[in-house]
Amino acid sequence: MIDLKLLREDPETFQSRLASRGSYDLQEILALDQRQREIEQTRSQLQARSNEIGKQVGQVIKQGADPKGPEVQALRAEGSQVKAQLSELEPQERELKAAIAQQLLLIPNLPSPTTPLGRDETENVEVRRWGDEQIPQGQTLKPHWEIGETLGIFQGERSVKVAQSRFMTLVGAGAALERSLIAFMLDQQIQAGYIEVLPPILVNSDSLTATGQLPKFAEESFQCVQDDLWLIPTAEVPVTNLYRDEVLEESELPIWHCSYTPCFRREAGSYGRDTRGLIRLHQFNKVELVKIVHPERSETEHQSLVENAANILELLQLPYRVVELCTGDLGFGAAKCYDLEVWLPSAQTYREISSCSNFLDFQARRGNIRFKTKGQKGTQFVHTLNGSGLAVGRTMAALLENYQQADGRVAIPEVLQPYLGREFL
RNA sequence: GGAGAGGUGGCUGAGUGGUUGAAAGCGGCAGAUUGCUAAUCUGUUCUAGGGGUAAAUCCCCUAGCGAGGGUUCGAAUCCCUCCCUCUCCGCCA
């Protein structure tokens, strides 16, 4: 959520910085805010008078006045009158406040001033590349879903029977490889300093609102209507919300969490895209990195988050590149975002395998996550960041494709061999 | 699912209609003091919104005792609805 106070002070800046992400009407919010504050002032003055009358009645009766006498009656009459006025203002103020909050929830975060301007993903900026891209060499190079089916470790059709399209079942060595990847990623991130979290994977609406998936993107998540619970689209949601409505001690920061969870996405509007293999599923596994940090450190923390994610790809010897998203491609709550894209030789392209965002205080404000500095009055909002470290299914896809051998086998990266207990699939 | 209990400030825990942001204790912070590993004394101690001010960690107003309504001149205290937690029984990975 953007800061209403700052918006009030400098609407032009907000408007112009938001322009790179679409058109948003801030004027209406400002008008509502103006009226709300006017009413609040009047209301609070009336309230003050009402409190005063209440006190007087109490005192007068204590001093022996007749509770039914004229003195008390006069005060009560005025009290009733003030109350009548209040009963008109109160609902107005409440409605205005609700309307403002509702509209603010629909405004995306301001892009960082350092975020490249651009309309869509074609204007993202490549930051660097790592590793040697393997170029398809005739018929020996297969896409990962063919490799998976050939090896008998994917059961795509049966998954459709059990659930729907866009679900995948891994069997035998495939299941073991997925599990090995998860364990490997967690071990690496724990070593890097992240504390592991295994959170609920159903969350309530408040949680999704805090991290920004609601109210605008309800159609992206699976919902359990009867219970106000949703399947998480990413561990970012439960892990960040661990600290919702809390005031942390400054000394507790930064908090680094890594979290393996399944993730569930409806992928509305992506019909026909990536229909095969592991790239775009309704359910997939991911190890997520989440950071809760001091505002002054969020820039640095963002850089190290990207490094921590990229490190997994380097250890697995998978070629990748780092791309900085332009303003038009930025996620709703992000101020700045780097994607890691892994090389998929079958498609001869890089595909997103991690998205590392800095939300600044956007989520903290929605979720009311603050910290307090010892000896200082008041509180500040923390900054939140997160990124995949990594998407496990896509890692498996990249691994199968990049490590496939001419004889049809798939080599296992050295770092994974202790986990899987074998050198080839 | 059945029965019961309960939700008060960082914590423990008073408070059943009248200056209650809310007793007391603990903790925290600041200061004083003591030669003994810490004790004692004094003071202080929340958050949010709005307004004032050049500005503030300063002043003023309002709100906050799970949430939302209601009764009343006045509600932590009374009424209604909802949420959550705990205990026992049942069921269950």
Image (spheres, rainbow, N blue to C red):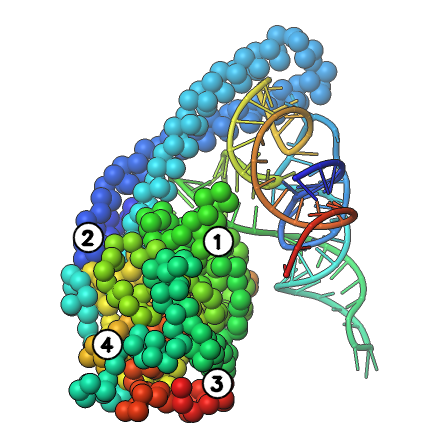
- Cα–Cα span, label 4 and label 3: 26 Å
Q: Residue at x 23, y 84 (%)?
A: A141
* Residue A221 vertical position relative to residue A395 in the rendered view, above or below: above
Q: Which residue is mark 2?
A: A22
Amino acid carrying mark 4 in the image:
Tyr
Q: Are marks 4 and 3 on the same chain?
A: yes
| Subunit ID for the residue under disc 2 | A
Mark 3 falls on what kind of element?
A: helix
Q: Which residue is mark 3?
A: A420
Q: Which mark is in front, 1 or 2?
A: 1
* Residue A293 vertical position relative to residue A264 in the rendered view, above or below: below
Q: Which residue is mark 4?
A: A350
* Residue A200 vertical position relative to residue A152 in the rendered view, above or below: above
Does residue A340 show up?
no
Amino acid carrying mark 1 in the image:
Val
Q: Which residue is mark 1?
A: A203
Task: State which tag comes first along the sequence, 3 or 1.
Answer: 1
Which of the 4 quarters of the picture holds residue A326?
Answer: bottom left
